[in-house]
Image (cartoon, rainbow, N blue to C red):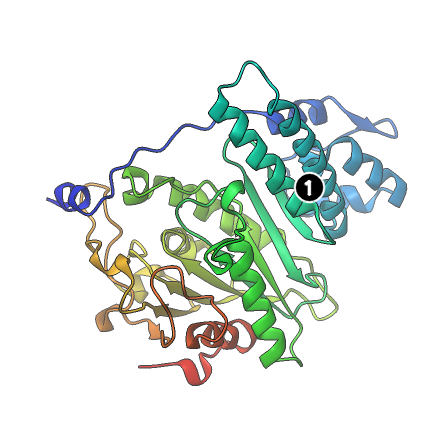
Amino acid sequence: MVFVLLLTTGWTVAQGDSQPGARAAALTAWEQGSIAGRPLPDPDASARALTGFFGSLDAGQQKRLADRYPLVVGNLDGAPVPLRYRANRAALADAREAERARTHSPQLTEQGRQTAGRRMHRFESILSGDRQILAFDPTGNGRAAEVFGDLSRAERVSVVVPGIDTELLTFERTQRPHSAPVGMARALQDQQRERYPGVRTATVAWADYTAPRGLGLDAASAKLAQDGAERLIDFVRDALPRHSGGLPEVALFCHSYGSVACGLAAEGLPPRVTDIAVAGSPGMRADNVGELHTEARVWAIRDDDDWIADVPHLEFGGLGHGADPVAPEFGARRLSAEGVSGHAGYFVPGTTSLAGFASVGAVGTGGSAAAG
């Protein structure tokens, strides 16, 4: 029955496959490399071990590793944040040139060359200015994370977890910018800085997991969300630097399918995660807040015109994501959606949803935007 409902609401478009690429080659080179006669650590080592390794190097040695193995260093939790920014700029420049070459490749179809051109321009855009790219992997459809604000000094860190169709080509958008991870995170950070100038905040556009493409079976199942949940737990636990006052508190802002990943991650998140806010959620793989097994405050919001309300809030045979987080019986705290337009409008400046998110992110309350 659930499958039929999903079929009739458009949840059955297939997702294309991703292929291994440059990062796999970079990891192989790293495993065979050394610095000052010392072997390089296992890239899957604990963040504590990696922090210790980089702490044993001088600045020149650190930079040499970032320049030589950018696709590895740029994604290592435990590596110094400024070094990750440096490495990812180098990795982006390499990826841009690789895509530039692919635009002329006779081995690609015309459509393939056009896609290569789009990716080349996307990488050029991300390289512009002084952008702080905390993670980057061009493999397949790609993954990335970008920081707004000073992550090394932040007392409160907001993490935006986006949903379906998130990849490198949709990491940012010129049209409807606040429907893409970069626009969402930038708007949230601007709102926090404007409303709470006394709080040191930073915001991360965290698109560092493989999201479903289209409203297909992947979007109706939890497989990709489970992988995203594990990566999110690792990120929150290991990637955020300690400042003079200790580790920052964290609020998660989970949009659409991203809320499935956040729901699955909830039980494993460290105590520093104080708030989980879901917007336009198809469900969190739980019947109520208690089943999330988290001490974090849970917030939910949905606009009346959001099409996600028409998706069955059921779970059967691995399809569907469970109860509706905005339903009173779910037990989440409600945020106002006044001024929101549709499924992609929650982070648009001027909406009460963005104002409420800023209050949650900066001080852990919904402010005047709370309802119910």
Picture residue at 73% right of the left edge, 53% below the top: 129
Q: Secondary structure at mark 1?
A: loop
46 or 216: nearer the viewer: 216
84 or 43: nearer the viewer: 84
Image location of residue 68, percent across then percent down? 78, 31
Picture residue at 73% right of the left edge, 21% below the top: 32
Where, quadrant-wise, is the C terminus in this rendering? bottom left
Is 98 placed left or right of 352 in the picture? right
Does 61 appear above or below 159? above
Where, quadrant-wise, is the N terminus in this rendering? top left
Task: Tell which residue pokes out farthest to the left in this image.
Answer: 1
In the rendered image, which residue does mark 1 sit on?
Answer: 74
Q: Is residue 116 visible?
A: yes
Picture residue at 51% right of the left edge, 77% below the top: 359
Picture residue at 69% right of the left edge, 30% below the top: 97
Quarter of image, res 39 = top right
Is 103 placed left or right of 309 in the picture? right
265 or 191: nearer the viewer: 191
Q: Amino acid at mark 1?
A: Gly
Image location of residue 138, percent across then percent down? 58, 34
| Mark count | 1
Image location of residue 156, percent across then percent down? 60, 69
Crowding at mark 1 (Cα within 10 Å: few <14, some 14-19, many 20+): many
Q: Is residue 138 visible?
A: no
Quarter of image, res 58 = top right
